[in-house]
Amino acid sequence: MHNLAVFASGTGTNFVAIAQASASGKLDARVAVMVCDKPGAAVIERAKEFGIETFVFSPKSYASKAAYEAEIVKLLDDKKIDLVCLAGYMRIVGETLLQAYEGRIINIHPSLLPSFKGAHAVEDAVAYGVKVYGITIHWVNADLDGGKIIAQRAFPYEGSDPAEVHRIGQKIEHELYVETINKLLCAR
Ligand code: GAR
């Protein structure tokens, strides 16, 4: 059985999709820990409902990114984590975590990369008048949203409502993330 760590900062619908797939056996892996950089985020309650251990930290209370990432690396090592899945973790992964885990960290992003990198991908794409949207899962490296692409799924949308794009996109995210994690773990 493989061990996953899911990193999230917000609502956690992707976290829930992964945890549910793990609980039902659809995903051949267990979520060993959920890491969250936002005390009070809804995802923390979701993790508790699934009985999944959480590591919640406040970046401001550390002297540096290296300091909190060193603690995260120790935790991931202790839990023997095979794959780190960023799921709405709205923080740039730094050198300390990358040095220890590069090649074992993936991210899900709400655009067809390399278009629309960054924290406002859907809003930026709508403002641009995009007609084909999509979701990307990619390896995480030092280049923001720039790592090699693992999976993508596109969908057409002709309107101009970012909330609707998010709704359509998130349904796709939940399926694509579970499928992709399974494929990556099978290949190991
Ligand atoms: C997801 O839609 C994910 O694609 C996005 O954050 C959302 C988190 O939702 N990630 C990024 O924008 C990363 N740049 P969730 O908390 O409901 O899983």
Image (spheres, rainbow, N blue to C red):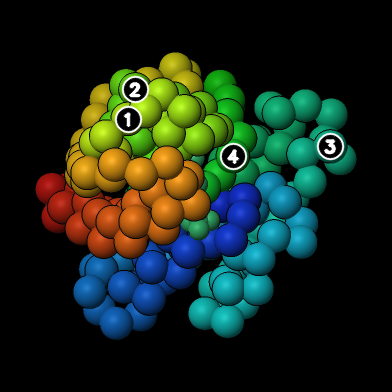
Residue 168, percent from left and from top: 34, 56
Dot 1 or dot 4, earlier in sequence:
4
**Mark 1 vs 2: CB contact within 8 A:** yes
Q: Residue at x 42, y 41 (%)?
A: 160
- Residue bearing mark 3: 60
Above or below, comparing residue 56 to residue 120 in the picture: below
- Residue bearing mark 2: 115
Question: Which tag is nearer the camera, tag 1 or tag 4?
Answer: 1
- Residue bearing mark 1: 130
Q: Residues within 10 Å of mark 2 (few under 14, many from 20)?
A: few
- The three-letter amino acid code for the residue at tag 4 is Met
- The three-letter amino acid code for the residue at tag 1 is Val
- Label 1, label 2: how many angstroms apart (C-alpha)? 10 Å
Specify whether tag 4 is near ligand 1 (CB below 8 Å).
yes
- Label 1, label 4: how many angstroms apart (C-alpha)? 23 Å
Q: Secondary structure at mark 1?
A: loop
Camera-nearest residue between 3 and 109 = 109
Whether residue 155 is visible here, answered yes or no, is: yes
Dot 3 or dot 4, earlier in sequence:
3
- Residue bearing mark 4: 90
Residue 84, percent from left and from top: 42, 47
